[in-house]
Amino acid sequence: MYEGIRSPAIHVPKTMRDLVSAATRFRNAIYWAGGTYIMSRHDYYPTKDSYDIISLREIPDFKRINRTDRYLEVGPMVTLNQLASIGKQIVPDPLTQTLHELGTRIVRKQATIGGALCTPDIRLAISGTLAVLNTEIELKKLDAPHTESRWVPTGKLYDRNGRLLIAKNEVITRVRMGFDHEDFSYFFCSGNPMVIPDETVSLTLVCSYNQSVITNFRFCVTLPYGGFHQFQDIEVLARGTMLPFSAQQILRIAKVLIEAIESTNTTISALQKERVRRIFEMALHQLNTQSLAER
């Protein structure tokens, strides 16, 4: 029944040096983090293209959680459950909410932050939330004579269509997030990205204001197969605005957002488009409510 199919060879490096060696020798191997996404694919195994696997689970540096006075650093093999359990005083609210949306508790105990960021063909809400929170990612090349590292903002890991931009020979080695907390934060996910990806929409939005004047405004719309959308021109449009937004302003900004997404030529269903509009408007109305309650 499975003639011509071979089982993949599994390599389990225990140090960064071992990882570099394995990556150099087996260039087509798949990097295996928690495995929750890979194993959920219906065509993963058996297949004639059963590539070797490089498991990252035994590398101690990838499991570390470090905290300084300025930021929190976590390795790519830290599970979503471990990150969520660090505490609300450290992990921003929208990230905690996002983590709890990503599957059941069993899945969150196995899934890793690095794996969630590096799914090749689907964008999960965590990538949008980390981008809005100005999180930085350390990427390391594994096949260079001397391993080279670079830091990039989370938003630079993907293009507007949501495609992963890191090279095949690069892995995430650290995720760094600051402790800045905005005056207002909002996260909402409608749908299930693994079950109904063509209908799912997630939005993360944060805002700071001083005497009812918006000083900082950042958001990201994430669609599993429809892209990763941040629009600096819309963010700039919101800054300097006096709260509360008028009903006309909310409708106008939401319309500009929909037009901006349509202009990217990404795949987005009519239902997703309507959900984006309504969720974005709902976020702005909640921002209005909070700002008025503080007066």
Image (cartoon, rainbow, N blue to C red):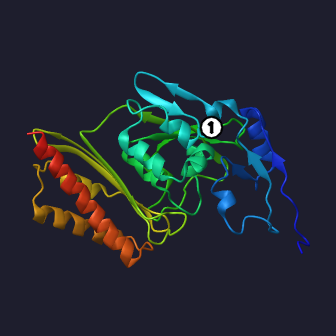
Q: Nearer the viewer, residue 266 or 152?
A: 266
Identify the amino acid type marked 1.
Answer: Glu
- The percent position of residue 108, horizontal first and vertical second, equals 57, 46
Q: Secondary structure at mark 1?
A: loop
Measured as percent of width and height from the top left, residue 258 is found at 29, 70
Q: Is residue 239 visible?
A: no
Q: Is 240 on the left-hand or right-hand side of 133?
A: left
Residue beneath the point at 65% across and 47% down: 34
Instruction: In the rendered view, tell whether residue 50 sits above or below residue 70.
Output: below
Image vertical order of residue 51 relative to residue 185, above or below: below
Q: Quadrant of the C terminus?
A: top left
Q: Quadrant of residue 47?
A: bottom right
Q: Residue at x 63, y 33 (%)?
A: 63
261 or 204, which is in the foreground?
204
Please give left or right for residue 82 compared with residue 128 in the image: right
Residue at left offset 9%, top offset 59%: 246
Residue 282 occupies which quadrant of the picture? bottom left
Looking at the image, can residue 281 be seen? Answer: yes
91 shown above or below 261: above
The residue that mark 1 highlights is 148
| Mark 1 nearby-residue class (10 Å; few <14, some 14–19, many ≥20) | few
Residue 96 vs residue 6: left or right? left
